[in-house]
Every structure is written in structure tokens, then in C-alpha cells.
Amino acid sequence: MIYIVQVALPVFQNHYFDYILPKNIKNIVIGGRVRVPFNNKKIIGIVINISKTYHYSLNYFPTIYEVLDSSSLYHPVLWYTLKIIADYYHFSLGQILFHSIPPLLRQGYLLDKSLYNKMINNKFIEIENILYNSAYYTKTKNLITSSTDELNFKNNFNKFYPKKYSVQICHSKHTYTSKKYKKIGKNLYFNYIKNNIFFTLNQEQNDAVKTIEATYNKFCVWLLNDINIQNQTKIYLKILETILIQKKQVLVLLPTINLIFYLLPLLFERFSVKIDILHSKLTPLERLNVWRRAREGKTYIVIGTRSVLFTPFTTLGMIIMYEEHEQSYIHNESCQYHARDLAILRAKQENVPIIMGSITPTLETLYNVQLGKYKKITFKEDLKSLEIKRILVDLKNTIMQNGLSLILIQKITQHLQKNNQVFLFLSHYNFSPVLLCQECKWIPKCTRCNYNYIVCKKKKQLYCRYCNKRCPIPFQCLRCDSTYLLQIGLGIEQIKNTLNTLFPDIPLIHINHNKTCYKNSLNIKCLENSCSGAHILLCTKMTSQIHYFSKITLIAFINIDSILFSANFRTIEHFTQLYYCILKLIENTQQKVDIILQTYYPNHSLLQTLLYKKYDVFATQELFTRKCMLLPPYIHQVFFCAEGYNNQKVYQFLKKIIIFLQSDSSYNSLFRMIGPHPSLKSKIKGRYRWTIIIQHPSRLILYRLIKNTRQFICTSSNEHNIKWNFFLYSENN
């Protein structure tokens, strides 16, 4: 008798691989890891099925090298959920199974090793990095190495860390915890803080809590609409009391790491339970330890970014999701998914409620509320928003200085003279400076990507933003030999130089893609504690750091025309969400705030809505427009993308797919196909890119067609030099 083991590998192929189990291996389980041969390499796979056979002719199958686990890595509900995710998004099961476990396990780390101690300079110690910060880590490591004994280390540690944080240190066999928290009773794990204004709920919030209480033990999707983060947290903390009394675990999902450090002290002040955090800044060993504690039921609350969704729980009682509209919940790497949708799916499979809060919910969420799939609780608008003055600046016939109008410069000067702070937002979709010949209108382009070169003044180079190709700035036009070359377009460096020239004594802070650069070498601590007085904050993408500025009295959107006329129909929605979120953030300020919008199209309908109406009005108008234009959420879209070095072969490859789609039995008149046509980024790194858009009102029919198409491509395609992929555009962008 021979055992045939089906193994899922982390590869693109959507099928399993058969291996023979050696007779000397007994402890193999479904859901465990095995090391197997694949393409002349040894890689790790997940066991999917084990079957018996008496056909000894199957001995030519490859043999498993070793078994790495004696028990499954996945709880039954999570295992079934991951299978649904792989099937729905058309991933290979091996891809999603490996994506859901910590990096160390993907590399073959053995779980039977002791993972609770870490060797640092011959001292066994583990720091539960609940407040992860590079400065904390460096100082703590110095404390470890400088401490001569156990008592000395404990005293040094208590001096360094704030007492309000429940940070646990394991030194040898002894565990030290903050003495502030005590268990009350035998089964009660809370330290109630009474007479605290922060935790006092108003009548509206109390009604919301009572409404949600009726669904504690069943699946239900709740949307807390038009409520800021502070009020969301009040409601969540009240709800957490009941969930934790039932000895159940809670998953808290946050869009950014910064919000973890906002929420964590509040949880420590309220509860005396084990709390873990999970995000990309943790070390692989720390992430594995969090995974193990949650899997074994040793932690009650796990807070993290989108990857925390795949954490196993023994008794999950609720999922809480902050700011469900945030784009950071979208994962665009190998496994493309939306964390909001996966959180709802997991809550359904676990049969627990999920609560999503947002000031500006996505249109898809509001559409599901209309269909009755989600339940919405709306809160009244705060009257403090009446103190916000909105100013629309018409840029026509207006003198400009590198994107800044004279009206805006005057306003900045007035607010800085009053020792206030100014927030300037430059669209992420704006133009960057390029070279233009005044004589023949020639613009230098990258030959590999067919895109205009960007001018980098500091390095005196032209570079391509896609392939990073660089070349020196030419002194004359390569077409007509003219020396009249101009830099056109608005770039972030131009605005920074202009602001530094106009306001040389004012600190300028630039926030871009989670990276913060400061004039005069200010660090992140200045943002949190020392950022007072007159400051200029120049932001190109992130806005969560606006929390750290207490005296913002001027907010200016430098140029929003690129948003109004963007090729991506979702850009307007994302900008509107950003705009109204900023309004909510500054409602608690006691002084009046000015908001300036610069545009060449002051009569645009969106701008009129932003100036005088609420987000609900915009959402209603935009949903009606989407319905008329046959766009999501009223229709579902799939993008088939292909790329290759031979432009004609890529085009013919997609033409074959269209012929197959039209011949499929599920194809009907409701299908709408656009393409093949060149992608917006038609050529990247020498590879030509083409796209097909497929639309249909039924998600199920579209899903079946895509599944059949994928099988057709995998079985019949001989184009090895063509890369292809597809994604559900209605959910991911």
C-alpha cells in the first residue's frame, strides 16, 4: 500500500502536486507543511489530501523529503475560509495558504522549538514590542546589554518605559508586568475606569451600543456612519467589555500603523488583558509569537493592519474595522484582495458580528446598505463644522508662483504671523517637471517605457519613474538643436523651494508615502510632542499625521484639477473622502479654520458639493452617475492584462481570449467587452502592455466565465514570453 499526498505549493498554477509518502514517515497531517522537490529545488508545501493506493506503478512520483508539522497550522473555519478566498479571487490555494502564515513558517521554521526566548548577548530575554519604535528598540537593547543582573535590568526598564503601557518582559523564568492592572474577580478581566469623561457615552452612542448588542452571537455587518475615530473608539471600548466578559477574542483592524499607537494606550487604560499588535514593522520572530499566542488563545485582543486578518483564533467573538474607506486596505501584490471584503467573509464564516466605522463610507458599502446586506447607524453632524470657512480660488487670470496663487500666499502669511500652522495638500496625481523645447515642442521620453522623463535638479539628471533609467540633462534639443529648453509641470520640489524662499524661518514638514522629511532635521518625536508654533505641512498623500498638529488654521488644496479629470473614475471618490475626513479632524479645534481650493474650473459640480453640501449628498449623486454610466457597484468588472516584448504577440494573445470568451456557453448579450487596447501605462521596462475589460451585472456569471478562461489559458497557451494577469476592478481600485 502506498500513500499519495496532494500538496499545494506557493506557485501560480492552480492545481495540486502529487507526492509519495515514505514508509518511515507516520505523523503527516492535512494542513501541515512538508518539504518536497519541485523543478530541481526543495520547497515547502501544504498538505491538502492524503489517499491510499495499491498501484505500485505510481512509484515514479517524487517523494516527500520531510514533514515539518505534526498538527495542522490552520483552524477548521480558517481553513475553509482560505479555500473560499482562493476560489473567489482565482488564486492558487498554495499562494493564499502561504500568504496567511508568518514569514518564518514559510521558510521552514519548526514550531516545536522554544520561541518565547530570544538570545541577546547570552541573555535569554524577550521584549514584547507592543509599542514598536526604532528608538525604543535601540534603547531597550542597550539596557539589556548594560544590565549586570536581573534587578538592575528591571529598574532600568521601568525608568525608560511609561508606566501606563502594559509591556511584558520575560527574563529567564520570571515575568514582570505593570502593577497598574489587577484581575478583578475570578472571571472578570477588566479594570473599569469610572468618572472618566472620555468613556462617558451620550444618548446617541448608548443607543448604538444597545442596537449592536442584539447581534453579539451571530453574523451581522454594522456600519457606523458619519462618526470620527474618537467617537468610534468610545463605542468600541464599551462593546469590548461584553465580548471579553464572555472570554472571547477580538480582532481590531486598522488602516495604518500610526493608529495602532493611538488606540493601544486607550485599551491599556481600560482593560487588563493580554493585547498583541501585528504589522509589517515587527520582526519575523515577533510576528510568529503573536500568531502562536492568538492560535493558542493566550491573547484576547489582536490589533493590526490588513495582514492581521489571517491570524488564527480559538474563540473569535467580534471583528472591528476602523476607517473602512481607507485605500491602504487594498493589497496589490501577488495576492490581490480588499481587506474589508475578507474581513466580512471571515466574520460570516466565524458567525460573529463585524463593526465598520467611517466618516465617509465607500460607495460599495453604501450600496450594500441600500440592498439591506449591511445595517447602518448614522450619527448627527457636529455643529462645530460651521466655523470652517471655505474659499474657492479661480486660477484663471491669476498670477502664480510655482503653483501658489497670490491669494494663497497672502493667507499663508497671515496665518503664520499668528503663530498658527498651515496644511498644504498637493495631489498625488499631479504632473512632474519635464523638459520642453520651445522651438519644436520636443519632450525627451524613455525609450523603454514610452513615458516622459522627469527632471531631477539636485542630481542634474533625467529619470524615468517606471524603470528608473537615468541620463544627463541635455543642453540642447536633440531634434532641432535649440537651446531654449524649459521645465514645465508642477513638482513637489518646486513648491518646497518656493516655500523655503518665501518663509525661510518657518519649519517645513513634508509627508509623502509614510516618509516624513523635515527641515532642520526634525524627527518623528517632534511631530508627536514638540511640533508647536508656526509650521508648514506639505502633504502629497498621507493625512493621518494631521492629528499631531493642534493649531492648524489653514488647509489648502493646491491643484485639484488633475483629480477632477482623472482617468480613474474612483479618484473623485477618494479625494472627496479625504476632504471630508479632514473637515472632521479639525472640528475639535477652538479657532476658525480656512480651507482654500485652487482650480481652473470653479463651476465644477463636485466643487460646489464640497463647498456647500455633506458627504451623503455627494454619495447619492455619485451613485446615480455610476448607475447611468454602468460602473461599479452596479456592474462588475474584470481586467485581463498581458505584457510582453513583442507588441503584436501580446495583442494576438488577447484576441484569442476574446474569441474563447465569446464561444463560452455562459456568454450572453449582457456581457460587455472593451479591447484589446493599450494600457494606460502602455510600455514599461521594454514590455508592451494590453488590456481587456469585461463587464457583467451578475458577479456569479462573471466568476464562472473567468474561471473557464483561466483554465483555457493554462492548458492551451504556448506563449511563454507573455505575462498575463487579471483582477476584479470593482473591488480593488
Image (spheres, grey):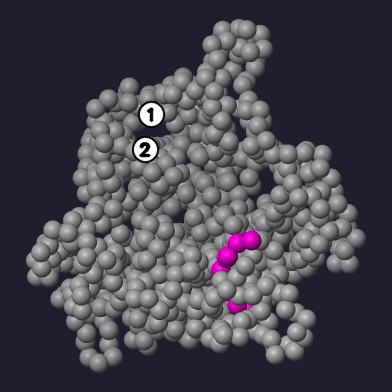
User: Extreme bottom residue here?
Assistant: 186
- Quadrant of the rendered structure where residue 499 is? top left
The amino acid type of the residue labelled 1 equals: Lys
According to the picture, the residue beneath numbered tag 1 turns out to be 496
Residue at 48% across, 86% down: 217
- Measuring 22% from the left and 85% from the top, which residue is drawn there? 183
| Along the line of sight, the residue nearer the viewer: 643 or 633 | 643
Residue 222 coordinates in the image, percent (x, y): 50, 73
Indicate which disc, 2 or 1, sits on the residue closer to the N terminus.
Answer: 1
Q: Are marks 2 and 1 in contact (CB under 8 Å)?
A: yes
- Quarter containing the N terminus: bottom right
Please count the marks in the image.
2
Category of crowding for the residue at label 2, using alpha-carbon neighbours closer than 10 angstroms: few (below 14), some (14–19), many (at least 20): some
The magenta segment is 40-48
**Which of the two residues, 404 or 60, is positioned nearer the viewer here?**
60
Q: Residue 226, how many percent across, how many down? A: 45, 61
Q: Which residue is mark 2?
A: 510
| SS class, disc 2 | strand
